[in-house]
Structures are given as C-alpha cells and as structure tokens.
Image: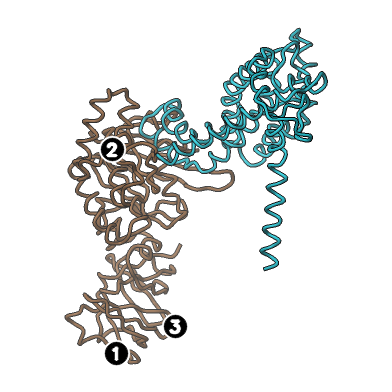
Chain colours: A brown, B cyan
Amino acid sequence: MSHSVELSGIGMTFGTTRAVADVNFKVEPGEFFSILGPSGCGKTTILRMIAGFIHPTEGTVRIGGEDMAGRGPNQRPTAMIFQSLALFPLMPVWENIAFGLEARGVGKAERRKKADDLLRLIALEGYGDRMPGELSGGQRQRVAIARALAVEPGVLLLDEPLSALDLKLRQHMRAELRALQKRTGVTFIYITHDQSEALAMSDRVAVMSAGVLQQVATPRELYENPATPFVARFVGETNAIKGRVTASEGGIVTLDTPMGALRGRGTAQAGQGATLFVRPEALIPGGGTLAAQIDRVDFEGAFALVHGRLPDGSALTASVGSTDLARAPAPGAEASFGFAPEHAVVLADA
Amino acid sequence: MIQRAFFIFYLACFAVFMFAPLLVMGAAAFNTSRFPTVIPWQGTTLDWFRAMWADAAMWHALWTSAIIAVAVVVVALPIGTAAALVLTSLHARARSFAYAVMVSPLLTPGVVIGIATLILWRQVGVGGGLALIVVAQVSFISCYVMLMVIARLQRFDRTQEEAALGLGASRGMVFRRVLLPFLRPALVAAGGLAVLQSIENYNTTLFVRGFETPLTVFIATKVRTGLTPAVNALALVMIAAAVIGAIIWEIRRRAR
C-alpha cells in the first residue's frame, strides 16, 4: 500500500531563522520523488516534518489525505532511512529488521519469518544472526532498507542514504533502490544534494534553495526548462550570459548582451534584466556569435569539455562529442560558437 | 639513563606508598600480638581468623552493611540514570545549572550530608536507622551513578532513538530495547561503584545510623574499645575476595 503526501503552506522557523518558507507540493502514491538542494537548503527539515520528528510552524502535512498535525513519528504510516542508517548495534540483524514488527506486538516466530523473507529480498539470506558491526557498508545499507520496509510503510523517507558509500557501490545501490521502489510500489521521498542521483532515479524532483521551493518537475523538464536561475545553475552544467531584454515575441526572447543580440526561449518582458542559459552540449563550434579565447580542452571519454573565455571575461564551456573531436578548437585558439534559440532559456533576474 | 632511574625510583615509591600499609595490615593478622602490629613479631598464628569467624557482632555489622549496599544500589541506579537522561536532554544554560545542583552533594562534606539528613527527617518524625542511612548515602552515591551514565550517554547516537520511534516504537520500548542495552555497561560499573562507596562510607553514615552498626562504624568503635587483629583478618579476607572477584570478572570478560 502506498500513500500520497501533500504539503500545503509549510513553513518552519527555528528561533529567528526561517529554515523553510511556504512550501507546497503533492507527491502521488507510488511515486519516486526527490528533494534536491545544496546542504542547508531546508530539505532535511522538510523530510523530518513529514516523518513527524519536528512539527511545522505553519501549514499542514497530509499523508494519504489525512492531516498529520499532532501525530508523532510512531503514529504515521512512514518509515525513514537515516543518513547514518542508525541501525541498533546491540541487536542482531534479524531483530533490527523486525524491530517495527516487535513494536506492533507481532509474535517472535512470525517476526523471524518476516525478517528472513526480507533478508532474501535484499540478498542477505543467512545473515540474520550477525551483528550490524560485522557487515560491510553496502550490507548495512540494505539492512536499513529492509528494516524500514518491514513495517510496510505507505511512504518511505530516505535522507541521503547513499552518501556514505563509495562511488561504485553508490551507483549500484541507486539501481537497486529504484528497482525496489518499482517492485514494492511504495511512495519514496528521497533527499539528496547529488543532482545526478536525483535525475537518474526520480519520477519527479523538487529543487530547493535557501528554504524556498524553486521548481517541481520531471528530471527532463528540470533540465530543459528550468523555472528559476537557481535551477538552471544547480541542475547540470550551464553557461550564463547576462543582458537586457529588447524584444519578446512568441516565446522567444531577444537579449542584448556584450556579445551582441542573443535569442532564447522565455517570457521575460522587454526592458527587464535577464540571463540567458545555454547548456555546454547545445553550443556548436564554428559559426556563431559567441567568440571565445580557448583556455583548455579536457577529454572526458565520451565527450570533451572546451573551456574558453568570452570578450567580457566570463567563462564559457562547450562539450563536443568524441566522434566530433575533429571540430573541437585547440587550446590557445580563437573559436566561435553558436546555438539554436530553442536550446537556450532566458530567465528574468530576480 | 637518569630519566629511567628516576622513573623506576618514582614507581617504587608509588608502589610502597600504595601497598605497604596493606602488607603491614595483612601481616598483622598472623601475629600473635593482641594489638594489630608486626613489630615485635610475637609468633605466627591463625587464631585471629578463628576469632573473626566466631565474632557474631562483626558478622552482624557486615550483614547490615550488605543490606544497606543493596538498598543503595536499588535506589541510586534509577535516580542517577533518570538525572543523567534529564541532564543530557536539557539545553546549554539550564544544563549547566542543573548539573551544578546535581553534583553539589559530591562537593559537600559527608559529615554535613549526614547531619543535614538527620535534621531534615527528624522534622517529620523519622529518626536514624537503616532507612535513613540509605537515604543519606543515596544522596551522593546517585551523583556517581549520574556521572557514569552521562559519560556513556554522550556516546549515544540519538538518531537510533528517532529510528526506533519512526518504526512505531513507544517511548517505553525505545528505553527498554535501545537505550537500556546501550547503558548496560555503565549501569553495571555504577552499581559496583555504589556498593563500594556504600560499604566503605563512615562519616555520613555515623550521623544517621540510629542504633544500627554497619561495618565501618563497628570497626571505628573497636578502635576505641580495643582493636584486635581479628579486624585485620577480616580486611585480608575482603581484599582477597575483591582481588579474586576482579580476576574472575576479567577472565569472563576476555572469554566473551
């Protein structure tokens, strides 16, 4: 069974610090939903409010349509996986996994059976009598997941659970988490500061900055149509060129910049200060308005990153596919780049 | 070289300072002399062990001390643990105030605690006796318990508590299944310390004892009325018991 989670007008103030302001979003049942943002942006605060460890100073949290006000963490259909995992070190693995069942008064034989079932699910069959300290990082990770799933939560909350793992294991666990979510159909709310993690796993992503929700969208939408300059900069690599809007027509905005008139998609009004964002892979070397002095070319395997400098001193990064390497300019050379207006986004400055 | 010589000299002094009194005391238990001494050595005997074995008053005093010690542990462990839990959940300023209040019995002279306890309970008609000895001793022994539990609690990962609550556990279950097992080593150690503190206490106990005579009071009385090496024999037996107990404990710990 999976539940929806709805936040309306959520705000949280600690003393005089406003950690979260007016956050609204709805997570659908069975969705893999990520909250992405730099550390200190309020994403963990939001997760803890959904779990019931803290209570919002404004707004309501609804889980499965029910208002959660006044309900503690042990009275909500949620389970949380902590960054530190927080396994109980003095209990064997199977008791860890069955802890939530013990809290619900399930008999010992049935608890053991359920724990063994879950151990099979996470491919740790036969590890039930080990202590958590005897497991590797990845195994402990899976035990924490099994422990949360044992209570059959409607919503699983994950607070950067992969951040302590090394890169290889992290990528493996990503795929495993995603598969597990599909198999169980439980609503996942996943906190991370790692954008590639959020983009790769999620159905939808909420991007936060300084306690304010910036955008809620599918990973592709976030990447192609960032709603705010923060999202454009935070999600993926981008080039930002500042200017002033001279014309806005049919969803295409013309921007007057030190490099001349540039065009991109947007709704900014004429006269507004705005920034044009264009992804490195949208820049085409040869024939364009952006003339750059090339500093260096970094070969990354599948592509090469060309780092240059525009006449106004700002940096420019273009990526060239490795099959196109012949077209990549050499370090020290002058090169010009162009882009199609539909591959650039213009956002009004705040 | 000189440094090394000095170090060995220091170590020797340290050992002599620590153990010489115990050696003399232990040896005196085997001297025929009617007064506990090793000089002059008037002949070797086991009579004092026999005298000790036959001394009903002494056994009664030991029994009284044991009852008090058990009662002190039973009362001081929960009080000290509760104080530690409250203290670690308080915020900075309230914490240092509460800490000062709770630790103050340790800094108060034992005599003062004894007299104060007696005066206070007299007001409500409770005189000296077993109950009051326990009350007076608990008032400072629970501080030791608290300090030891706090030291352990500081290493407790609070997210474990949250994890347990998040899995649906009640507060009681979190305490019983997560916190208590974690605190167990500290509680065992604190219990041991409480027993020792209780049995060896004299100055506080003296004022609240009423007509009871725990071991320390018994021995002190003997010093005035005529001490015999039977007390040395008892001391030697207690030391031996403590050493053997410690060895067994250590062997069992290593076996685990």
How far apart marks 1 and 2 lie (CA) works out to 61 Å
Q: What amino acid is found at the position of numbered circle 1 in the picture?
A: Ala
**Which residue sits at x=38%, y=60%?**
A228
Q: Earlier in the sequence, mark 1 or mark 2?
A: 2
Q: Residues within 10 Å of mark 1 (few under 14, many from 20)?
A: some
Q: Earlier in the sequence, mark 3 or mark 1?
A: 3
Q: Quadrant of the C terminus of chain B?
A: top left
Counting from the top left corner in percent of width and height, residue A146 is at 27, 40
SS state under label 3: loop
Counting from the top left corner in percent of width and height, residue A7 is at 38, 40
* Rendered image quadrant of residue B171: top left
Front-most of residues A268 and B3: B3
Residue A112 visible at all: yes
Q: What amino acid is found at the position of numbered circle 2 in the picture?
A: Asp
Q: Which residue is mark 1?
A: A330
Front-most of residues A304 and B163: B163
How far apart marks 3 and 1 lie (CA) works out to 19 Å
**Going by the image, does B42 lie left or right of A265?**
right
Q: What amino acid is found at the position of numbered circle 3 in the picture?
A: Gly
Q: Which residue is mark 2?
A: A129
Disc 2 sits on a residue from what chain?
A: A
